[in-house]
Amino acid sequence: MQIDYQNTTHKARAIVHHAYVMQSADMYIYISETIIHQHVKDAHTETGAYQRVLGTRHITMSEKIEVVAKNSTMHGEGPHWDDTTQCLYYVDYFVDVAHRYNPATGQDSQLNLGASVLSVIIPRQKGGFVVSQKTDLSIVDSWDSGKVTTIEKVEADTNMFNDGKVDASGRLWIGSIFNGIGIDQSKWLQGQGSLYCLEGHGSARKHLTNLSSPNGMAWTEDNSVMYFIDSTPRQVWAFDFDITAGAISNKRTVTDFSRFSDIPALAIPDGMNIDTEGKLWVAAYEGGKVLRIDPTTGNVIRTVKFPCEKITSLCFGGKDFTDLYVTSSAVQMTPAELSKTPLAGSLFKVTGLGVRGRKANMFSG
């Protein structure tokens, strides 16, 4: 991968080399060696030529990618780090199974909520969880009981819910897509989805329509901007966000995957998170990568490569939010494809990134 960075006073060129070193059956070390050639612009040159080379810096970064739950899902999604329990919750989308990974014990426990589609499980401020099943929004009163109480049926079952996240006011934002269970994903109907938000005390409100595959969401620290992904057009969007009213406006495109030459043509943006520096972390489904994107330029400024292609979503966790948990998928993979990427469907943890995420929000209902 090659990335060029520019501003008015200097130009830097970064060349990144990647390698995997297998440590054990479930442990990989990701090595990223970045060589930066920094050139400083001559202040007396009106043509803007870069004439003086003031030095070369060699920076080597090492990231560790660990498989913490091997082949735990068919289609892993919706990772949410619960700061209270210090556990990670995530789902196996098509089989309606919730997972709870406890890094202190290494245990990955499961909760089967029935024969439906489960896309999110997010802790509530009042205890228990808010979950989505097909197009129902429901409450699970506790992990131990697994008792489900439906809040609202939002759409007909010709659709199903996909990715969702809670904003700083405790609202659940969640998107719907065509219910393509049993149908090849390339044949799913497009433009049937919508984006909703569920207030803690009310019903779901529709904010966007004609979406094909609504996915990742994130908010700036000051809650002035909401980032949102529709995977099919391969775009990350930004909206002005009114946290008091729970409203979005002024849509614009942050970036488009078609810009990136090192991303396969079939790769799409999926789940998303944001770090404390305001940079976006986007899962590249069918791209085998997580991309760190600067939302002010739309450029990729960092890439983390994984040993499987279907990277679905991610979130920051751990006591100081420096661990990056990443879900993946093995859905609709052939035996030959699985033999090439046997870790598909696993839960990964990335450490050594040198960045920090923010605490996830709980549902207020």
Image (cartoon, grey):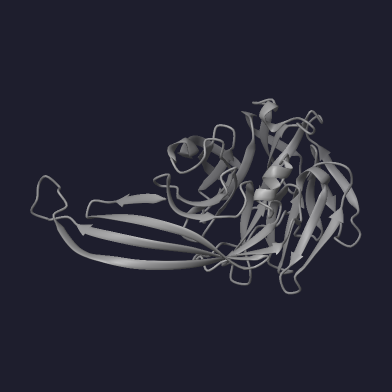
Q: Residue at x 9, y 50 (%)?
A: 45
Q: Residue at x 67, y 32 (%)?
A: 194
Say which quarter of the image contains residue 214.
top right
| 108 shown above or below 343 | below
Q: Residue at x 77, y 61 (%)?
A: 100
- Residue 62 falls left or right of residue 49: right
> In the image shown, does 170 or 234 lie closer to the viewer?
234
- Residue 130 falls left or right of residue 112: left
Say which quarter of the image contains residue 208.
top right
| 363 shown above or below 178 | below
| 105 shown above or below 73 | below
- Furthest-left residue in view? 44
| 257 shown above or below 321 | above
Residue 100: tell me if it is visible: yes
Residue 281: tell me if it is visible: no
Expressed as whole percent of the image width and height from the top left, the position of residue 342 reads: 69, 53
Expressed as whole percent of the image width and height from the top left, the position of residue 165 reads: 66, 49
Expressed as whole percent of the image width and height from the top left, the position of residue 213 reads: 64, 35
Number of numbered callouts drawn? 0
- Residue 215 falls left or right of residue 124: left
Say which quarter of the image contains residue 176.
top right
Expressed as whole percent of the image width and height from the top left, the position of residue 257 reads: 49, 39
> In the image shown, does 21 or 41 lie closer to the viewer?
21
- Residue 344 falls left or right of residue 98: left
